[in-house]
Image (cartoon, coloured by chain):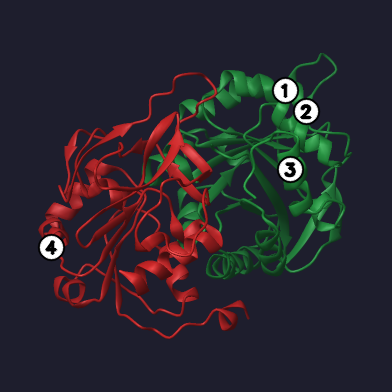
Amino acid sequence: MLAKRIIPCLDVKDGQTVKGVNFENLRHAGDPVELGRMYSEKGADELVFLDITASHEGRKTFTTMVERVASTLSIPFTVGGGINELRDVDRLLSAGADKVSVNSAALRRPQLIDEITGRYGSQVCVVAIDARQEADEEWQCYVNGGRIPFGKSLLDWAREAADRGAGEILFTSMNHDGVKTGFANEALSLLASHLTIPVIASGGAGTKEHFRDAFTQGHADAALAASVFHFGEIDICDLKHYLSTEGVNVRL
Amino acid sequence: MHEQTIKKKPIVAVAVVKYNAGNVYSVLHALHRLGVNPVLTDDAATLRGADRVIFPGQGEARNAMAYLRDHQLDSLIRSLQQPVLGVCIGQQLMCRHSEEGDVDCLGIFDAEVRRFMPQEHSQKVPHMGWNTLSECRGPLFEGLGEEEFVYFVHSYYVPLCTDTIATSDYIHPFSAAIHRDNFYATQFHPEKSGSVGERIIKNFLERT
């Protein structure tokens, strides 16, 4: 049976991993390649590396890091951050990444999804969506690291992305991100019921139970987290054994 | 460094088929980690002269077959005598025909590649992620336990057939690996399947 996936996410700036709480107040958490290898050995099913550097120099550093990750790790990994055009995708896949994650640039120019999947296939294209549940209970998409509302609803955009060939949706709830009170299970469940591609839950992991709920209530195919792993609050190996005893099929 | 702990002597010359189907870097990296220095090539003499040939890839069957025919790689791959390992689309291209693009393939395996048809909403296509192997037999799986997890990404599959040497189950059972004569092929990506995948590649290099 296909296993539910546990995915640590590493935000990378100038060659170092960082993780924001509610996208701000970045803290250091080590060398991304070393951290990635440790997670792989502990049973992480995939890894995500997000480039949060803005500069051209930073981009080159990140590409070098992607090459190091590819030569070191024997599990799949996704890279994202600052992917604006097909040329960025070419560069990162050539460096050895298995998948790319596109976010703001795809919202601004949805054709980018068609271009990526047309050249490399759906399986390489993860569409990351940062969304916030507003006062009227509607989920709205945000761009620029969650700073600017885009004016499109989560479900509409997720469906369009899937129709354009996206291989997976990585949904981050801005309401839940960094506050460790659990994933946005209702919204996840809504996405799962409307999409025929896998959904990765992101934002809100604080306890092992939260992961279980993302799978059993949110019907997510994978769950992504950062700080609970980076700061040792949850051990991936323990987490997967816990999920297994709770009836969630995971790779042990 | 990790490489030092698993360093192996380069016991064989390994050629990886260079063509237009996707990401071959992960296969090259996996071989490097095993201490092998592979050559990525579409040169007939180099491919014929290698001890082992790996035919990897991700991509679309019709385009891939057109490229192989244009570069006379179709007849070359069919005629190889040394152990050959097809991976993912490589496996599918080694079959008789694929529903993907309704295209005739290499015909090394007498199998028809089919598209997964979901029976219920929760069954998503592509089949993406870690799934277990069952009924494994032959040298590729020596030293591995029952129900090992390996990494799959695919929308098309090879049905169970007489050449099946490992099965997996998604929507229904299908061939996770097939073997005939000197040709081996896996639907999953051993190069992305952690230590289990590493062992399968090592077995291919040392035990076939």
CA separation in Å, label 1 and label 3: 20 Å
Please name the color used to draw chain B.
Answer: red
* Relative horizontal placement of residue A99, taking residue B138 as reference (left or right): right
Q: Are marks 4 and 2 on the same chain?
A: no
At mark 3, the secondary structure is: loop
Q: Where residue A200 sits in the image (x, y, percent)?
A: 64, 37
Residue farthest to the bottom, as pictured? B9
At mark 2, the secondary structure is: loop
Rendered residue at 49%/52% (across/down) = A89
CA separation in Å, label 1 and label 4: 52 Å
Q: Amino acid at mark 3?
A: Gly
Q: Are marks 1 and 3 on the same chain?
A: yes
Q: Are marks 4 and 3 on the same chain?
A: no
Q: Nearer the viewer, residue B36 or A183?
A: B36
Name the residue beneath numbered marker 1. Answer: A187
Name the residue beneath numbered marker 3. Answer: A145
Please state the chain letter of the residue tagged with numbered disc 4 in the rendered image. B
Please name the color used to draw chain A.
Answer: green
Name the residue beneath numbered marker 4. Answer: B76
Q: Where residue B69 sits in the image (x, y, percent)?
A: 13, 53
Q: Nearer the viewer, residue A232 or B83?
A: B83
Name the residue beneath numbered marker 2. Answer: A184
Whether label 1 touches label 3, CB < 8 Å: no
CA separation in Å, label 3 and label 2: 18 Å
Please state the chain letter of the residue tagged with numbered disc 3 in the rendered image. A
CA separation in Å, label 4 and label 2: 53 Å
* Relative horizontal placement of residue A58, taking residue B76 as reference (left or right): right
Q: Amino acid at mark 4?
A: Leu
At mark 4, the secondary structure is: helix
Q: Are marks 3 and 2 on the same chain?
A: yes
